[in-house]
Amino acid sequence: MARNPDETRFSQQRDRVLKAAAHCFNRKGYSGTSLKDVANMLGLTDPALYYYVRNKEELVYLCYVRAADVGRDAMERAVAEGGTGLEQARRYLRFHIESMVGDEGPIAIMSEIPSLKPEHRDEVLDLSRQHSKNFEAILEGGIADGSIAACDVRMTGNAIMGSINWIPKWFHGDAAQAANMVSEFPTVLTRGLAA
């Protein structure tokens, strides 16, 4: 079914709003960012911004859901392409980092989860836990197929995820650095996994 052009425009503009908000939240934190900061970055008026989000809490919530979607999509692509557990882990990291530092970025760092209202907080935490479990399943698959050395998959997964999830805090858009990260980080972060 074809999408309504108005829905497509709304979706594209909302995505621009979420990218701008992620940029602001990553730089200034939740309390240091105002909706006016986001509107100014996009060249919108405050009322125009309220067409896309009701308030700042909803904005950070939507940023976190978007970040979870980007990570899930990267992992699903990596797993769908098959291969050993180690190959899937490296491919997932490459896809996720490409998204973070490429056209889909910036992605919001999920550092302000306590600022969310309870139902949003629970949803975001569930998304995060599921993502971690899915990565742990890749690691377990690699242990089973012999491509990954025996390890504590929870601790290993947390260490690797912690490394990539902090990228939006220090990456500031340099294209050469982005290309280097995409090519080098997956190997660096998984070098110790190989059986």
Image (spheres, helix red, strand yellow):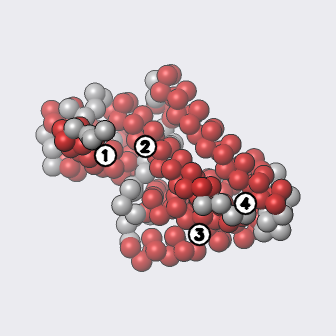
Q: Residue at x 50, y 22 (%)?
A: 118
Label at residue 118: none
User: Callout 1: few (<14), some (14-19), or many (20+) C-alpha neighbours within 10 Å?
Assistant: some
**Left or right: 148 as drawn, with respect to 46:** right
86 vs 34: above or below: below
x%, y% of residue 122? 55, 27
The one of 12 and 3 positioned closer to us in this rendering: 3
Q: Are marks 1 and 3 in contact (CB under 8 Å)?
A: no
Left of 137 or right of it: where is 14?
A: left
Q: Secondary structure at mark 4?
A: helix
Report how far apart the C-alphas of labels 2 and 1 lie in the structure: 9 Å
Which residue occupies 69% across, 64% down?
Answer: 83
Q: Which residue is mark 4?
A: 85
Query: On the image, numbered disc 2 is attached to which residue?
Result: 66
> Can residue 169 be seen from the camera position used here?
yes
4 vs 3, front mark: 4
Disc 2 versus disc 4: nearer the observer: 4
Amino acid carrying mark 3 in the image: Phe
Q: Residue furthest right?
A: 150
Q: Residues within 10 Å of mark 4 (few under 14, many from 20)?
A: many
